[in-house]
Image (spheres, rainbow, N blue to C red):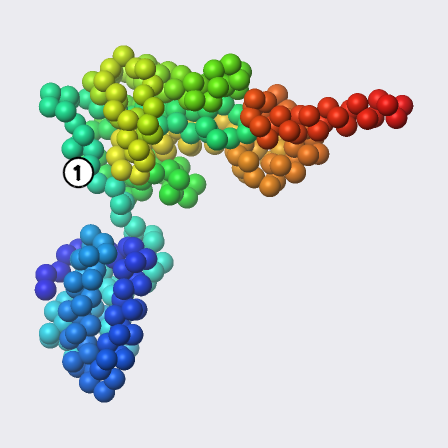
Amino acid sequence: MKSRNKLLDSSSSLIVVEMVREISDVAYPGNTSLAFKIECRFLHVALRVVSRFQIVGYCSLESSKPSTCDPRQAQDDRFYWCDGRGAPLQQSSMARNRRTSLTWKFERGLRPEGVAIIAGVDEVGRGCWAGPVFASAVILPDGLEHEQLDDSKRLKAECRAELNQFLRGHPEVHWAIGIASVEEIETHNILGASLLAMRRAVEGLAIQPHLCLIDGNQKAGLGCRELTVINGDARCPSIAAASVIAKVARDHAMAELAVLYPDYGLENHKGYGTPEHARALTLHGPCPIHRRTFAPIRKYARTQAGDHVGDRRLR
């Protein structure tokens, strides 16, 4: 069995480990040697099926001293996973050393012949009740890797911040941000404003792309070739990078707006429709950065207007 210096990372792998152990214990309760051989053989096959990771090694549960990666030479039937250096691999360390689920294979398959420069384009804030919509366009050097490079929705805030700093400071990464204001959302509707922000992002690039990969199913009306990709931020590194840069930029903008409008908790929910946001709207009604064409905001605006009419009648 070949050893590869990769970390087991998916929860499905851990489930399979425990499942196989239980099966082998039940099937061979008195024959630990045979049970271990069957267990290792099945684990090797099962983990190939459920993930792209390989079995890394084995380490005795009784001690942290690593054992051989070949189960046929193992002496102890109680083993735990270890990394390529022989260190026991706990779930927390797997999370810390998580490798990205994104590869370049899918994105490279979308590249037409003769196309040299590709930009990923994504927006953020489309479903919010308040604040502008942001979009980002990013051109990555082919094959660029970072352990956090993934859909921004899958990353914690500190991981997004780390990746954002890496991307914006990389000398070979070209990026730009486009914004559509609340007024433009009211004028063009949220779809039109999102596409407007995308166009502004692409136009802001120092190098104009030959092809733009756009997250979703709507083309933005760009001056170059466009290809829409459903769930593109979870499939294409360029779109994932755009999603992270747009998300971090918008979160920062909403934190600044929270200082101007402190009653709504914008620094927490970033304008999305949360219970905290709904309670604030019930108490204070919409403020200037709320999207009044959105149905929930119209409801709170009518409620507030009705309260004012009742107050005047009481007087």
Q: Is residue 256 visible?
A: no
- Image quadrant for the C terminus? top right
Residue name at image x 33 percent, y 52 percent? 96
Neighbour class for label 1 at 10 Å: few (<14), some, many (≥20)? few
The answer to whether residue 257 is above or below residue 278 is above
In the foreground, 63 or 187: 187
Location of residue 153 with respect to 225 vertically, above or below: below
Q: How many marks?
A: 1
Give the residue number, with chain letter if any, for mark 1: 105
In this view of the protein, which residue sits in the foreground, 142 or 220?
A: 220
Q: Residue at x 37, y 43 (%)?
A: 154
Q: Quadrant of residue 38?
A: bottom left
Residue 219 visible in the current orientation: yes
Q: Which quadrant of the figure has residue 120? A: top left
Residue 250 position within the rendered picture, expressed as x and y whole percent measured from the top left = 46, 28
Residue sitting at x 19%, y 57%:
49
* Residue 141 horizontal side relative to residue 177, left or right: left
The amino acid beneath tag 1 is Lys
| Residue located at (20% from left, 36% from top) | 106
* Relative to 188, 289 lies left or right: right
The residue lying toward the viewer, choosing from 264 and 85, is 264
